[in-house]
Amino acid sequence: MKEKHREGLMEEKRLFFPPTGFSSKAVMRNPEIHELGRDRTKFWDEQGKRLDWFKPWDTVLEWSHPFAKWYVGGTLNAAYNCLDRHLEGARRNKAALIFEGELGDRRVLTYQDLYREVSQFANVLKSFGVEKGDRVTIYMPMIPEAVIAMLACARIGAPHCVVFGGFSAEALRDRVLDAQAKVVVTSDGSFRRGNIIPLKESVDQALKNVTCVKKVIVVQRTGQPVDMQEERDMWYHEVIKNVSIVCPAEPMDADDMLFILYTSGTTGKPKGVVHTVGGYMVGVSTTHEWVFDVKEEDVYWCTADVGWITGHSYLVYGPLSNGATVFMYEGAPDYPEKDRYWEIIERYKVTILYTAPTAIRTFMKWGESYPLGRDLSSLRLLGSVGEPINPEAWMWYYKYIGGERCPIVDTWWQTETGMIMMTPVPGITPLKPGSCTIPFPGVHIEIVDHMGTPVPKGEGGYLVVREPWPAMLKTVYGDDKRYEDTYWSQFTGVYFTGDEAKWDEDGYFWVIGRVDDVINVSGHRIGTAEVEGALVDHPSVAEAACVGRTHEVKGQAVFAFVSLKEGIVIGDELIDELKAHVVLKIGSLARPDDIFLTAELPKTRSGKIMRRLLKDIAEGRAMGDTSTLADVAVINFLKKNIDAQK
Ligand code: WT7
């Protein structure tokens, strides 16, 4: 179970205290805040007041296990909280979004600008028949229109389903169908490392014989020629012309759906994680302000794509609800040079940077000369998310990016939790490199053994959430049973995260990683079953089994074991073809690093593939117990051949 890179973790003894200048000015500097958070209902009742409500709530929480309703009786609108309420005072002309494209094009939208464009696009959606409750799929590059489309949906109460632009046409199709989307918003293409990714082309493929989608709205980004299907397809810049800038924000029940976001689980079918308006907005707004210590004059940069939960919570809803200035970048970190991020920080005087360990490890590999060549003195706080950060990467981030003056907030959370759950509060919490420290105030996390009993300090087990929290998922879209089965049935009464963790004598948490069939590749969640499904879909493949293997930069990489149908000739071209097939079915993020072709997969006598042993082999470590295998020769053959290749 234990990952190589997380061994010996709790021996990390270095402790970093918040710099005095930082603490004395921090937004949250009350050391008793965690204590106050113990009265969870009172705490979240209090935090609810940070939003603007059309009608206040009657009851902060109705808990009918495992279904929670937060801020019951209250009505509000997420877009109103991100836009309208900032228009009264000095924030009206403050930059809401500062955008830079990969080719260097720049755009600044003030809160007033964003409000205007969101209202107009909301009216466009309405004119195409989108009503409260209808789903809209957004398949876009990292450009302001992606944010505009999300907020326009929120404004009229149409849940958005953002699909990451790196997903293939087939993956997009599955998600459009599951959500039964009425409209798709996309662009002609997107820029990536100087190339053009043809998004509209993927949409066209995805929508073949799909009847639920009535309109496709296309933003012109790259300018390459695209097919426009008459009646169905419209250019964004044409439909938005002369549209009214007045569009009242729809009052939504706190428990109404704000969005669906698909994520991988243990089966081949991605889950539509449903988030609601009230609890989600309170959760992301509170955590964003306190964890990132956001002040009026900050320039906040979250490098995550809007296609992931981090983009939803900490690029859009958290920061904009707090009236922050958000920086948004479209392209790759090494285009045109490997110092693009540092050039951006220097140019815009970014003060807060939120990125992923895999990016940090990549920068480490490129070397410190790139950050050292730029002025990063504007930075005052750094964040990390998506996977465990190894102490070495933490120290590098601290030294070369933060200049040894910026606290690092290592934030643990999930698509399902909606908001950050474990994190330092930077003005208060001393930091340990590699630990996400302690739960956020008002969040009750525990580590339990396989019986569900909490383990004492100094020990490890399964990471669970004991009590409901405001930004928790409401359900899996259209499948309450899957919601109950996936999250609430492993251990009685608690939410199971799928992660393994330890806590040390000081009560600090050290997340080790997933214990279910999810692989975390560069902070992206990939289900082994999805990759296996894609492989088995290839005409030459009989069976496939995938496991995660520790990878120096990506955290984990996909390692696939594949058995072929009778008569298929093993060859290198076939391996490339299989990799390409996975890219076609899911997207390049799921491409296996290694595929090993074998006559047979190791199985138990009852026919179950023994992934545990395959994992041992992929990691190149000693194999565990093989006594339940039907034929031990199969695994010995695999081990010998794979070890020989290394
Ligand atoms: C899984 C959730 C939350 C946004 C990005 C990922 C892992 C996430 C950390 C962290 C150790 C982390 C966990 C979790 N994870 N953040 N700071 N330290 N592990 O969201 O795709 O829903 O994946 O990412 O394994 O379960 P996600």
Image (spheres, helix red, strand yellow):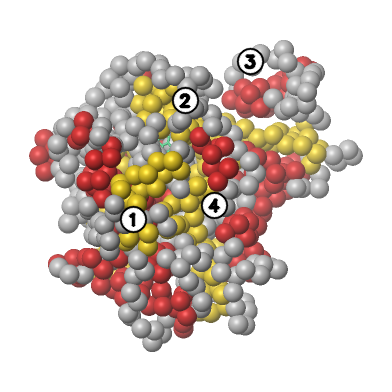
What is the distance, in whole Å, between disc 4 and disc 3 at their CAs? 38 Å
Amino acid type at mark 2: Tyr
Q: Is mark 4 within 8 Å of ligand 1?
A: no
Instruction: Label 3: state its secondary structure.
Output: loop
Q: Which residue lies furthest to the bottom in this view?
A: 242
In the foreground, 457 or 3: 457
Res. 462 mark: 2
Instruction: Label 1: state its secondary structure.
Output: loop
User: Which residue is labeled 4 in the image?
Assistant: 477
Q: Nearer the viewer, mark 3 or mark 1?
A: 1
Count every numbered label the image shows and give the total: 4
Q: Earlier in the sequence, mark 1 or mark 4?
A: 1
Residue at the location (64% across, 16% down)?
623
Q: Which residue lies furthest to the right in this view?
A: 567
Residue at the location (52% across, 57% down)?
163
152, above or below 361, in the image = below
Q: Which of marks 1 and 2 is nearer the N terminus?
A: 1
**Residue 167 shows in this picture:** yes
Q: Earlier in the sequence, mark 4 or mark 2?
A: 2
Instruction: Label 2: state its secondary structure.
Output: strand
User: Which residue is labeled 1 in the image?
Assistant: 73
How many residues crowd around disc 1 within 10 Å: few (fewer than 14), some, or many (20 or more)?
some
> Is residue 114 rendered to the left or right of residue 181?
left
User: Which residue is labeled 3 in the image?
Assistant: 624
**Residue 394 shows in this picture:** no
What is the distance, in whole Å, between disc 4 and disc 2 at their CAs? 26 Å
Q: Which of marks 1 and 2 is in front?
A: 1
How many residues crowd around disc 2 within 10 Å: few (fewer than 14), some, or many (20 or more)?
many
Amino acid type at mark 4: Tyr
Q: Earlier in the sequence, mark 2 or mark 3?
A: 2
> Is residue 62 rendered to the left or right of residue 227?
left
